[in-house]
Image (tube, rainbow, N blue to C red):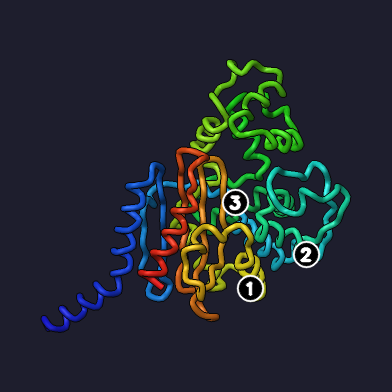
Amino acid sequence: MKLLVLIYLSLSTLSHAWEVDLKKEIEKMDHDFPGEIGVVIKNLRDGTILKYNDNKKWYLSSTIKVIIGISLLKKVEQGKINLNQKITLKEKDFVDGGGVLIWSKPGKKFTVGEILKAMIRESDNTAADILINQIGVKELNFDVAKWMPGTGKITSLLKVRYLAYGELHPKAQSLNNMDFILLKNHPLEKRHEVFAEKINVAVKDLKANDLEEAFEKYYQHGHNSAYLADFVSLLEKLEKRMLLSKENTNLLMKHMESMKTGDHRIKAGLSPEVKFIQKTGTQIHRACNVGLIKKSKDKADLALAVCIRKPSENMDSDIIFKKIGQKISNLVI
């Protein structure tokens, strides 16, 4: 009996070795990093899980687009939305950021499927807000409450701008979407001054010293924020087709695998032979990378969510993501 117990304990220690070793490596990184790192990684092969700084909600930035995509495709399966439905782009739809839609002329038509593709592959903010409008904010948050309990309210990307600039001054509500696009064209350190001029308020009367401080105040409200373990659980359910049909699961994961904005983060540190089905998110002082790692064409091996709070926009947080990818390759895969 004692021998069997010793064998069990030995095997148990071996199966959990990756978790212990990787957590030590992340602790070292976090110690040397002036910001803060949050990590949750689940080994889908045996159910072991690593949690680091997971007892708080992390701002998700553009990784919420995965949630939007799942909610949209759920509505497609329910017959409420059609991927072939055409939507006419309007000037009021534009949201600052990358992607093909913001460079398109008002009046151009896109199918819902094309907009979904732009949102995931190019992290197109205009596409995200169009799809949120199609789903409905109330319906989207109803879905989120089922899938990721405790998540802060998911808002449109344009709403993020109103809320963050509102921390500078309440008159931010007088701006329109095109005003925020013009503000984005100015250097970050000057935007609060341009904003003050735009709303005809003296800089000294702003409620925050600059836009960076305003965003920090905005983050404290908990909108678009979640526990990383909840996001990992969502990814695991997606992988197991517990949320969508096989066809729609494959469609969303195909877009995530073809995403154009994540080559310098976790993917940069992973072994080239593995697939990373992912989404990134970036906002002032915040960055995230979530996804599923596959060694073969079959099931995913790992589900992960990594977020970073950096104290300065001049700091390259991609180095941390890459190091985590390297450690995953060395210790887990």
**Residue 49 locus on image (x, y percent):** 37, 65
In this orientation, which residue lies closer to the viewer: 100 or 4? 100
**Relative image position of residue 225 (x, y in whole percent):** 51, 47
Q: Nearer the viewer, mark 1 or mark 2?
A: 1
Q: How crowded is mark 1: few (under 14 residues within 10 Å), some or many (20 or more)?
A: some
Q: Nearer the viewer, residue 274 or 54?
A: 274
Whichever of callouts 3 and 1 sits on the residue coming sooner in the sequence is: 3
According to the image, label 1 marks what residue?
250
Compared to residue 37, the image places residue 251 above or below, namely below
Q: Residue at x 69, y 53 (%)?
A: 124
Residue type marked 1: Asn
In the picture of the structure, the residue carrying the numbered disc 2 is 82
Q: Do the residues labelled 2 and 3 touch (CB within 8 Å)?
A: no
Distance CA(mark 2)–CA(mark 3): 24 Å
What secondary structure is marked by label 2? loop
Q: Are marks 1 and 2 in contact (CB under 8 Å)?
A: no
Classify mark 3: helix, strand or loop.
helix
Label 3 crowd bin: few (<14), some (14–19), many (20+), radius 10 Å: many
Res. 272 mark: none
Residue identified by numbered label 3: 62
Give the residue type at disc 3. Answer: Ser
Could you tell me the amino acid type at mark 2? Asn
Q: Which of marks 3 and 1 is in front?
A: 3
For marks 1 and 2, give the CA distance: 17 Å
- Residue 56 to residue 117: above or below: above
Q: Establish if 243 lies above or below 205.
A: below
Closer to the chain start, of discs 2 and 3, is 3
Q: Position of residue 34 (x, y in %)?
A: 38, 42
